[in-house]
Structures are given as structure tokens and as C-alpha cells.
Amino acid sequence: MIAFMARSAIQKLITLFFVAVISFLIIHLAPGEPSQVDPLNPKFTPEMVERFRKEFHLDKPLYVQFIYFYRDLFTGRTLSWKDNQSVLKKIRQRFINSLPLFIVGTILTWTISFPIGIRSAIFRGGTYDRSATFFAYLLISIPGFFFTYILIIFVVSHFQVPVIGMETFGMGDTTWLNRAMDRLWHLLLPSLLGATAGIAVLSRYVRSQMLEVEGQDYVRTAKAKGLAPDQVHYKHALRNALLPFVTMFGLILPGLIGGSVIIESIFAWPGMGRMAYEAILARDYPIILTLNFVSAVLVLIGTFISDLLYLVVDPRIRL
Amino acid sequence: MENATINSQNDLLEEPLAPKRTRLEEFWRLFRKNRLAIAGMFFFVLFFALAIIGFGLTRGSAPILDPALVRLQDKLRPPLARPNLERLQPHEIPKMGIYIFGTDDLGRDVFARMLQGSWVSLTVGFVAVGIAVLIGIFLGGIAGYYGNRHIRLGQLLAAALLISGALSLVSNMCWAAAVLLVCGAACIFVSLKMKKVPKRDTRSAAARLWYFKTLSIDTVVMRFVDIMLCFPSFFLILTVVALLPASIYNIMIVIGLTSWMGTTRFVRAEFLSLREQDFVAAARALGLNNFRIIFRHMIPNAVAPVLVSATIGIASAILTEAGLSFLGFGVPPPHATWGNILSDGKRFIFDAPWLTFVPGIAILIVVLSFNLFGEGLRDVLNPKLRERH
């Protein structure tokens, strides 16, 4: 167990190093320089550009820049090129904004997709199953931005509530109940939209997993000895079908920093995705690279946790 | 008379056998049962035809349906509206005599723009997936077929020298680059010269170091896949597309270069199992070279899962392109894509909802049909997943 953990950790560190190198290369070898972002601005004189390049080590060779950048990142001194603020502080602020979206979205995904998938598997081939399948494909195929506008029109015209932004501007001193309801309405749509694809994919996965277990001999035995159908489905089949999903808890971790760019842009939600989008537009390399690095770290930690959970849950696996 | 008896004997002989069907007939028999997949295929073909017709109608300097013609007199007309004949110049009158999908805020015909955009979606989907599939088959094939061979230390040294030479060339250090590149070339030359690997006992210390086995090829390729999977894909695509000059070819290439990992894994898994099968052993025993074994015998047997994932990959490439156009990256403005029609139309969502709904529903239908068609293919091509009713 310890040996497995050590081996896996070393492997992941090597992977992380290469991710850092490749992302750095992609960004710095792309045509155009951050100092040329606004060449028409009269305040951007050649001396200014020169100072800018010197300040951010852009005049040094690439490998020196690489070392400087990751030294700054690990000591927490990375500065944004746009406004000279600490990158980590900015990311923390946006992360706190994105967190409620992530939590509500994850809860919605996992609570909605399981009942749908299980019911589809039990009544396989029936009307419910076929319509659930079709709707799952529909949700996977619908472009997020289009679906967003449909839902915004629907909610705004039927419930008359504002949905753009994190809260209604200028609420003044209303009661806390009003405030909470307002926040909730603003939270509901973006997190639901973030969850749609997840609901569709996960419910299909639950269905196929459940079908596989329902075909096993011990389920047939349970049926044959006259147990109530509910007991067969939920006690014998479901508990065994749940196994792979435990490990998926590790894999939702990268979603923490994902923050959909498109959804957050439409809803003017000041989260991670929007920050990434703004950083890309401004060629703010430190923020882009830091986000990339943090999300790679989360992906690696996620797979590590899911491997460990697999070990714990399934005693048949010996690594 | 004699012939007749022989024939009847043949009939008798063949009677108890299962009816003979070609692979295609069998495939079609199974595929037909899946009504959703049939609908998917219908729309797939329809979209293909429309995109090609649209390309023909909207290209050139004087197209039959001009997607860029501005008619400010006729702006924001609803779908199926007739053009305002008395206020239009003769050359501005639409050839169809009707605005099927209405016009946008500059009075451009949305139908013509949709046709132009369908060609963009089609080419982006197919070219991006084509690139991804080619890379996937290449890397997956190498990992699966040559996977247990090892990279020698000498080869690693040559590669490292060449790569660092290229890097220092990029970062304007000409002397270091020249030295590194020459050293790398010398390494390759030496290893080509000593093509025959000497016997283990007779090696000198230097040769032993030179031929020291490091990583297996399989490890290298699959770790590279792991590395690529660590990147958040849409964010990476967005970054690269934003940094590169706006052009449709860049989008195709970038989407292709960031989506080959699934195919690589599929092909590697298929190759690993095919490599051990009897027909490959027979082909090798016949003395066929590796090239022929891979391309004539193994790839045709490994192509089914690739085909499925390619179909679904086209769907997601179309979605990605639409998302990029929606955010304002990608194809430069006068050219219409479904994403930027929707993006332009969103300001008029209450006054002119067709500008949002026409492209949105078009993307939905096309992506849905590709997904359904792909899933139908998967069910038919993979007997293990075939549902038994």
C-alpha cells in the first residue's frame, strides 16, 4: 500500500513537471508577445515596453523565465501582469465565488442522475427508459450557450426574477430572507446548466452499471428465492453497482477549478472560468499558467484519490 | 439432367447452413432495429448534403445566395417574410424571393448565412477529427505494436540534444543551438552506422552504456497521453486559439491536436490484443514485414472502435467550434458560422428570437444526430454491447 502510494506519487510528480514545461512552452512560443497587447495605445512608448520586458524577465532566455516563474509560483510571489496584484490572492477570491456553483452543481448531478439511471435500468426497454435515453442524448448535444438563453428567457418571463450576476444590485437593506432567496435564484440557473452534461452522462453510466449487475447470477438467485423486487433491486443489485461510483468522487475534483467559461461569461458570474477568459484576452500569462498548473494538480490528486478509494472499496484489487 | 441433380445436391448441402449474408447486410440488419440511430443517420446525410450544396451556393465573388450582402432596408425581418421589393436595388433582391429564416440586424439573409456556416461546421468537425484519428492511430499503433521495445540511452541522448537545440534556436541562442544540433546529428549518425547491435558479452563499457535500456516505448507514449489529459481541454483550446491569428485552419488544427488521447488508448488496447492473435502470428510466419502486418492485417481489425469515437468526436468538435465562435474567437467576422450567428443574435433575443433559435436548433440537431449515429454504430460493431431483447 505504502509502496503503491509512493510509486504513484513519484509518477504524478514527473507528469506534473512535464505539464508545467509543456504549458509554459505553448504559451511562450505562440506568436505575439504580451508587451504588444495594445500597440495603438499612445502611452505604450518603446521605453515603456522595454521597462515592461525587463520587469517581467521577458528579455531573458526561455529556460531562465521558466525557472523564475515557477520559483515565484512556489513562493507565492507571482504577480499578475495586468494589475500587479498577487495571482494567488486573485485566484482565491474567484475560487470562493465559483465554489457555490460547483457545490450546488455537483449535488444536483449526483442526486438527479442516480434515480433516473436506476429506474431506466429496472424498466429497461420501456417507454421511460427510451425517453430517458433520448433526453440524455439531447442534453449532451445541446450547446450550452443556447440552452442558457432558453432557460433565461423561460425563468425571466415566467417567474419575473433577475438571474444575471451573483446578486441583484442595489437591494439595500431588505430582510435576510429576501437576500437569501435572491442569492438562491441567482445560483440556481448557472449551477443547473453546469450540471446538465454531467446529469446526462452519469445517468447513462448508472444505467449501464446497474444493467450489468442485474444480469449477475446472485441477482437471479435473489429473485428466485422470492424476495420482494424492491429488495432485489436496491439491496442486492444497487449496492454492488455503486462500487465504481465511489471512485468517481476523486474525479470530480478537477471540476473545482474548471468553472465553465461560457456559462460564467453569460451570467456575468465573477468566477474562475471568467477570470481565465479575461486573462486570455489580456495575455496575462502568469494567471493562465497558474490556473493551468493548479488544474493539472487537481486532476492528478483526483486520480490518486480515486485509485486509493478503489483499493479501499474493492478488496479484490491488489496493487 | 445431370446438372440438375448436382444442383439439387448442392442445395441439399447448403440448406442446413445459416443463410449467407455479407458483413454489410448483417450490419444493416442489426442497425435497422435502432430507430434513433436511423434517424441520426438520416440527419447526418442531410447535413452533409446541405453543407456541400451550401458551399457551392455561397462561395465565389458573385454567389447565388450572398451571405454577406447588407440590406439595411430589410433588417430584422421575421422568418418567411417577403422582401420589400420596391425599396431594394435590383441586385439586392434575394434569389429565393423569400427570407426563409428571416434577416439579421444588418439585413443579411440568415438562410444564406446558415448555409455558409454549415460548411464551416462540417469541415471543422471532419478535419479536426481526421487529425485526431491520424495521431491516435499512429501513436496508439506504435505503443501497441512496438510497445515492449525499449528506448536506448543513446537514442534518448540524441533526442534530448536535438530538442534542446531546437529550443535554443527558438530563444535566439544561435551558437548553442548549432552545437547542440550538430551533436544530436552526430549521435544519430553513430547509431545508424552501428546498426547491428553487438552481442551482450562482446560489448565495451561505452557500448554497454550506449545500449542501456531506459523506458519502454509504451511507457513513453502512454505517459504522454496522461500528460495531455491533465490539461483542461476547453481552456487550453481557448488559450491557443486566442494567441494564434484568427483563422479557421488554426481552430481545426488546435481541436485536432488536443483530442487524440481517447483514440490512442483505444488503438493501443486493440493492438495489444490483436498482436497475440493467431492470424498475426501466421502473417509473421509468412515473412510479411511489420509495415504490411500493421496496415493490412491489424488496422482493419482495430478500426471499429475508432470509427465510433470519431463519429462522436465530430459532434464534440462542432460543439467546441460553436462555443469558440460564440466567445468571439475563431473565424474572422464577415464569414458566418453557426456560433457567431447566435452570438450576434443574442442582443436581439426578445425582438428577433429566430436569430438565436435557428442556429441553436441547427447545432442541436446536427450534434444530436452525430451522437445517435455513433452510439448506434457502437451497438452494432461491438457484439458485447449488443442489447438482447
Image: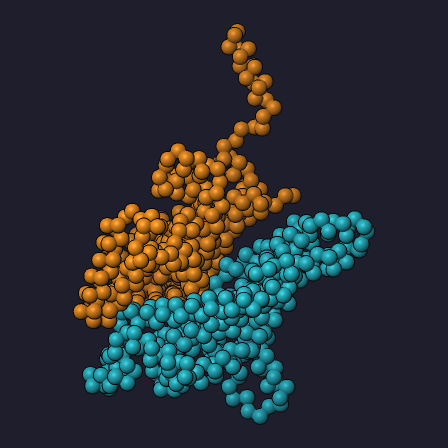
Chain colours: A cyan, B orange
A126 relative to B8 in the view: left or right: right
Task: Pinpoint residue B17: horizontal percent, then vertical percent.
Answer: 58, 25
Q: Position of residue A102 (x, y in %)?
A: 55, 74
Q: Is residue A77 above or below residue B106?
A: below
User: Seen from this angle, which residue lies furthest top?
Assistant: B1
- Regarding residue B94, the answer to whether it shows in the image is no
The answer to whether residue A103 of the structure is visible from this angle is yes
Position of the C terminus of chain B, as image quadrant, is: top right
So how many labels did they put on this image?
0
Residue B30 is drawn in which quadrant? top right
- Residue A294 or residue B157, whichever sits in front: B157
**From the viewer's perspective, is residue B32 above or below residue B127?**
above
Where residue B346 sits, quadrant-wise, is bottom left
Residue in front for this viewpoint, B344 or B16: B16
Determine the image quadrant of residue A234: bottom right
Q: Residue furthest bottom?
A: A173
Relative image position of residue A48 (x, y in whole percent) = 23, 86
Q: What residue sits 41% from the left and 81% below the top?
A: A74
Q: Residue at x 53, y 83 (%)?
A: A167
The residue shown at (24%, 69%) is B168
Question: Is residue A249 toward the left or the right of residue B155 in the image?
Answer: right
Residue B353: where, in percent of width, then height?
Answer: 46, 66
Residue name at image x 58 percent, y 28 percent: B18
